[in-house]
Image: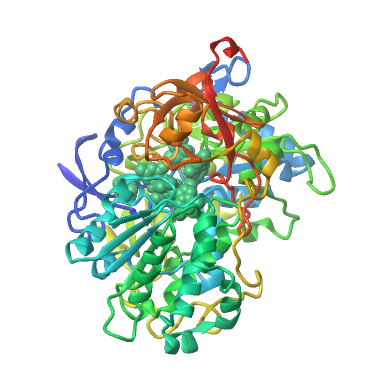
Amino acid sequence: MRTVRAACPHDCPDTCAIRVTVQGDQVIKLQGDPEHPMTHGALCTKVARYVERVEHPERVLHPLRRLGPKGSGQFVKVPWDEALDEIATRLKAIAARDPRAILPYSYAGTMGLVQGESMAARFFHRLGASLLDRTICASAGAAGLTASYGGKVGMRTEHFAQSKLILIWGSNSIASNLHFWTFVQQAKRRGAKLWCIDPRRTETADKCHRHLAIRPGTDGALALALARELIVRDKLDHAYIRDHLEGFEVLRERAMPWTLERAAAECGVALEDLQELARDYGAARAGTDAAPAAIRLNYGMQRVHGGGNAVRLVALLPCLIGAWRHPGGGLLLASSGWFAPVRRDAWLQRPDLLNGRPVRTINMSTIGDDLLRASGSDFGPRIEALVVYNSNPLAVAPESSKVVRGFQREDLFTVVLEHFMTDTADQADYVLPATTQLEHWDVHTSYGHTDVVINEPALRPRGQARSNAQIFRDLANRMGFDDPCFADDDETLARGALQGIDFAALRQKGWQALPVPDAPFAKGGFPTPSGRARVDSPQWGVPDYIPNHESVATTPSLAQRYPLAMISPPARNFLNSTFVNMRSLRDIEGEPLVEMHPSDAAARSLEDGQTVCVFNDRGRYHCRLAVSTRARPGVVNGLGIWWRKLGLRGTNVNEVTHQRLTDLGRAAAFYDCLVQVQATDPSAAAE
Ligand SMILES: Nc1nc2c(c(=O)[nH]1)N[C@H]1C(S)=C(S)[C@@H](COP(=O)(O)OP(=O)(O)OC[C@H]3O[C@@H](n4cnc5c(=O)[nH]c(N)nc54)[C@H](O)[C@@H]3O)O[C@H]1N2
Ligand SMILES: Nc1nc2c(c(=O)[nH]1)N[C@H]1C(S)=C(S)[C@@H](COP(=O)(O)OP(=O)(O)OC[C@H]3O[C@@H](n4cnc5c(=O)[nH]c(N)nc54)[C@H](O)[C@@H]3O)O[C@H]1N2
Ligand code: SF4
Ligand SMILES: [Mo]
């Protein structure tokens, strides 16, 4: 029996350290590392069952070539050599005309530095393929945070345990950031007051003292009104503002029109609730013996038109009250920026292999439109080949009817590296079997904490599976790429991925903490050129409230036809679209559903449990109706992200979302979406 150090590979801020007990080639036990302070021995329900995923009977274990029409799911096993030769031949032919017609499409199926963008990036850079703008999750918030602070930096998660007031803002922490919640509970036991700011009454909202169910996309208005209250009631930390914030005066100008009354109307909440929130936050001003206030912002609130600006505004609040003076005060959206000094991205990804060739960048959030575009001077060559890994775009990208049409183009050559026959794999010309986290090397940074975590292979690859890095190494070889970097094996990539971290110590312990100070911005030191947080940014100007693309105010005639705002936050037992095919987890989630407030259901004569159609001009999503006060009036919650083929009539929630982008970061605005809901008409079944 041996114990192997592993890391959870999933797109989750917790990046748990895992201990795997192995006998022979079987896992005896898989548990959270009890010694890792962030993991404290506990994994979430999903990953506690990771072995089920690894040994799942439906895993893709051989290279497959398409037999039937695209999407028919008919494939035949082919030997690796044949698959690699044929793929290389096709890619070579396209590259000979214009390599930018080849597009890699990947996201966060694994967050590992090795099985993410290492050998794959080297391969596509050397090929001269189109670059992918990775915007589908967090880029609006990342841009917003960078505008205010200079980087993706913030409080350390464990310090929330010392906070006396916690604003959980746009985050269903119990579902999607479970280990953070442990620290919140510690704070709560010590008397902290918890606010949840979320249109949905989540399980997290249930456990907070107060829940503010604002309308989706109105966070910027709320932040401006809170800033105004702090200013007019003089709850400011004047010394902190003077020394560590640039542009206070312009913020004051922006905030002054935003009375609490106006914000209450815009956000659709009671004035008294806003007054109480403003009082609580103002009372936490530093400089007296006030208790520290912390904000846990998460990406849920930036998936709307004004998401980037909203993050900018919220991020300025802790500066106004000097919350940063205390380790338990400040804000956390993402900790990823702390890793910048240790990551060797240029070595891992080798952008220099582009060798000065022209680049074309495709935004992953508009893949639907872009797959359907013809060559043109403003676009470049039509996309002729797609290589998909670590992602399931058919399920997760917005406006899926267009994504599906794009993938079904007969002239498109598609290769998908996967564990399972996802909706996307169904459309492939070749499906290549990828290893899971227990079968390959990796190293992980985190976007929720500040530890590096190692992942050593615990098992032999199942079937004929190969790691992503191995597959791209093999393809590079077939393409005749002879730069020595294409010979680096996975362990070499893992060893070289980071600098300033002792690899032997990392292997021994399983994780290593970065030296992040306790109260990182107590004396300023933000990673901006001046070291101060800033209101005005050279790139983006002064932040403001930007209403949704689709709302009663911005698109009144659309809102007449589609009066309900829909958000589609993650389901607790899935991770994006990962795990939807695992029966034991799917059974907990039940079936695809949309939550609707009883008043909205009554107005439509709809009943709990009936099958409904959520629709707009873009598409129709069929699912079960849950009449529930988890939804606020006027807003429906379509919990994500089901596989289309496991949903009703082969649809999922992204049938109705759109491809318009956020204000900053060119991101998808999934939660900025108007719909109508009606009973499904059985006679329309064929449409
Ligand atoms: N179990 C589970 N965990 C996950 C994921 C998952 O799918 N399942 N997804 C992972 C991923 S990809 C990410 S990016 C991270 C972070 O994941 P996020 O997508 O940020 O997930 P949540 O923490 O659930 O936060 C979303 C919350 O924001 C709320 N919300 C929606 N619109 C608004 C709005 O306009 N304003 C405000 N204030 N709130 C709004 C939603 O109702 C929801 O409760 O979590 C990761 N963790
Ligand atoms: N409507 C709506 N849409 C959303 C969201 C939402 O809240 N609402 N959330 C958005 C967000 S935040 C995100 S991050 C995206 C997520 O989008 P994706 O990153 O595409 O996430 P997943 O759906 O989890 O798909 C990851 C796939 O990678 C595969 N995979 C895992 N490990 C490996 C590996 O080692 N090798 C290979 N080759 N494959 C692997 C998994 O089997 C899985 O099918 O979705 C976005 N879409
Ligand atoms: S999904 Fe998140 S909570 Fe679950 S094991 Fe992975 S890192 Fe930990
Ligand atoms: Mo995400």
Q: With respect to residue 107, does 210 lie above or below? A: below
Question: Is 633 above or below relative to 358?
Answer: above
Q: Is residue 625 left or right of residue 283?
A: right
Rendered-image quadrant of the C terminus: top right
Q: Nearer the viewer, residue 551 or 144?
A: 551
Residue 570 percent across, percent down from the top left: 42, 41
- State the residue at coordinates (29%, 48%): 206
Residue sitting at x 29%, y 50%: 178
* Residue lying at the far left of the rendered structure: 1
Q: Position of residue 591 (x, y in %)?
A: 39, 26
| Quarter of the image where the N terminus is located | top left
The image's colouring method is rainbow
Q: Position of residue 343 (x, y in %)?
A: 46, 65
Along the horizontal axis of the image, is 65 left or right of 29?
Answer: right
Residue 162 drawn at (x, y percent): 24, 70
Seen in the picture, residue 398 relative to 313 is either above or below; the reply is above
Q: Quadrant of residue 324?
A: bottom left
Q: Is residue 425 above or below residue 114?
A: above
Q: In the image, what residue occupies the spot 46% across and 41% down?
A: 633
Query: Which residue is painted at 45% across and 72% down in the image?
Result: 317
The residue lying toward the viewer, choosing from 316 and 84, is: 316
**Residue 404, quarter of the rendered image:** top right
Most distant residue in the top direction: 683
